Amino acid sequence: MRGEHKGPVGNIWRHLPWVGAIGCILAVLTLQSALPARHAGFGAPTSSQPLALSADGELLAVANTDTDSVSFFDTSRGTPRFIDEVPVGREPSGVALAPDGGEAYVTNTVDGTVTVLKLTGNRKKVRVHKVIQVGTEPYGVAVTPNGDNVYVTNARSNSVSVINARNNHVVDTIEGVGIEPRGLAITNSGDDEDEIVYVTQFLSLPVPGKVDGADDAKAGYVTRISTKTNTVIDQIALAPIADTGFKAAGDALARIAPGANFVFTTGAYPNQLNNIAIKGGFAYVPNTGASPNGPVRFNVNTQSLLNVIDRAAGADANRTINMHQAVASQTNTARRFITQPWAMAFKHASNEGYVVSAASNIVVKVAVDPDTGAAAVLIDPLDPTRVLQIATGSNPRGIVVNENDTRAYVLNAVSRDVTVIDLTGSRESVIATVQSAPLPLPGTPEDKIHIGKELYNTSIGVFDPATPGGAPIVGRMSAAGWGACASCHPNGLSDNVVWIFAAGPRRTVPQHTDFDQTDPARQTQRALNWSAIFDEEEDFELNIRGVSGGQGLIVLADGVTQDPDVLAFLPRANGGRNQLKVRGVGAWDALKAFVQFGIRAPLSPAHSDDPAVIAGRQVFASAGCASCHGGPQWTRSRIEYTPPPAAAQIVNAQLIDQLRKVGTFDPAAFNEVRATAAPPLGGDGFSPASLLSISAFPQTFLHNGAVNSLDSVLDNVTHRSAGTGGADTLSSPADRENLVRFLLSIDAHTVPFP
């Protein structure tokens, strides 16, 4: 165990001089049970979360990502009592407590550090003890059950740091853990030298032989690490499911246009693996499944998956459930689907657990079979017509359960508070909500961005004033809480899925590239979507209505009724029109403000002073790459007019001057098809992709995911010669290798080309 025992145990030797060696050992073991636990007394595994409980359940720590702080609460009574809010590094994403609650470990994602906080004075005083440098964008953090070591996932450097909790030094960095490691779960066999660390890889990876855009094109991955050797044991593939339980009206990849009947089976592959929890012989991974084959409809695009790993076999248990099916099967038609399942936690003394739905602002309860691992979403015991759903604050992203299974605590990222759930009685109930960090002052620019963040991350959108009949309109952002902007753009970025959309196969574009982040006013904007079919953020209104089935945010003069006159494509200007008001702010104005100011470009682990990066930058310049990928947004695409555009600028519903033909369109490719089964856009070229933070989205490149590496992108002679008028200046493999190194180094700190 960590550190030396002091206090009562240390004094035994003085007060019991007559006890022999064996007697002393027995006395020590007897009295140890009365000490503050330095190991997990309830024998539970540990997992990474944005909030943490001490082993005795009497101290709660909460990471406040938006305010760069951690808040502490005394949870020894029914309602948590605030202790302190302590500044840490930038963008704290995870927090873990030593089993005795004496130290807290906080991952500061932007700083690349872990802050160690010491708690003294019966855990009522908190101070910064040490700041430890780890990898790039540390995210998850978990302490081994007996408190000896701390494991940290470095999301952008694709590694795991191991911190010795005795001296708070990094003792190991484990490489080869996979792409974007996020969630952590650590077994508890009673011996930290023989535990297994489970690490989720956030984005799914291509399945060999499959074509992007298909419902089975990718698989999720979980890496296993041995604590004995701090080496990777293996990677467990989580397979797609063949049947989501929801039917489509057509099959774009089979070239079957949508019809009147919903008869086509849809599959889905696991994606956005943010969290993992261990229960008995199984590990459970909640995630947002992708069902990208067209036609796109609100209930056949993203799914709510819970994957199961058989720990003994080290393999997918083939027990995956789509939690959306439980909601669809309920007899009560007032449905709220379990959108973006982000985290989960189990009770300690029963085979029941809880999953947080980040977009739908609820917690649902599941039961698992200890023998097979099979899971099921439970029905409300007070209302057998519906799934049990416990309301939370806005955008729940973490959950922990105390040691005696009487309380659960849920962190709500947008409302910046904690929901306290009573787990006793016949039905779980909310007994308190405590503020973890202050909200922006109403009417300030920060408040406008924050409202936009709420809209971006919610699948519900209950923001309307009461209608004349007294009933509010619900479902502004999606039908039945099915989808949110964040469902495909987690944290404003990309799910890296190739969707078969109305224009053709289109990989999700991360929105940190929409506006020039070097412009304080964020006024410089690129053309939106691969085919430059949008020139305003407001043009995504019909995505809300069509893809997600929501009511939308552009309204008539009454401020409530949906405006029917919204075009899917150019040339109509949608900005500046009547908008739903959310706390006095136009909803689209707020959403745009969030995209402009609230989405951070991912950081690259590469160093600008690396000789290969320096050489690659020179190759980038000499090869004319900046002609398509220059400027602070790392793309030449730029809107230089006030919408709408002139009619001459629009060809085939595209901003024709924004497109470039670089040899990346093959009309004969299997996935080159529209959602309607018609031939896709692409013959006129594509809007040049932004290279800003391209390292964060590996394994799937180009508009249709046709290649799985930047090396393969550069194998295309037409593409690599586009900046030199057709002259191939990149025939040297060494030059291409250095160029790739430079491309992978580009982030917001990289000096752009004119």
Image (cartoon, rainbow, N blue to C red):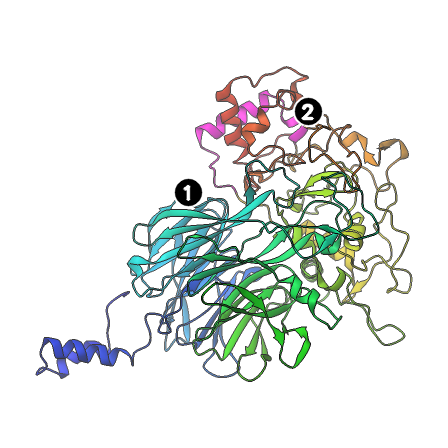
> What is the quadrant of the C terminus in the image?
top right
Image x and y of residue 695, in percent: 54, 39
Q: Residues within 10 Å of mark 1 (few under 14, many from 20)?
A: some
Instruction: Give the residue pinned by disc 1.
Output: 176
N-terminal label among 2 and 1: 1
Q: Is residue 616 magenta?
A: yes
Q: Please name the amino acid that badge 1 sits on.
A: Gly
Q: Which residues are magenta?
A: 604-630
Image x and y of residue 489, in percent: 65, 50
Residue 189, compared with residue 541, is above or below; it is below
Residue found at x 48% / y 41%: 605
- Tag 1 secondary structure: loop
Q: Is residue 554 magenta?
A: no
Q: Please name the amino acid that badge 2 sits on.
A: Gly
> What is the quadrant of the N terminus in the image?
bottom left
Which disc number belongs to residue 663?
2
Left or right of 81: which side holds 468?
right
Image x and y of residue 437, in percent: 57, 68
Which disc number belongs to residue 71?
none
Q: Nearer the viewer, residue 712 or 666?
A: 666
Residue 233, compared with residue 115, is above or below; it is above
Image x and y of residue 491, in percent: 61, 53
Label 2 – label 1 distance at C-alpha: 33 Å
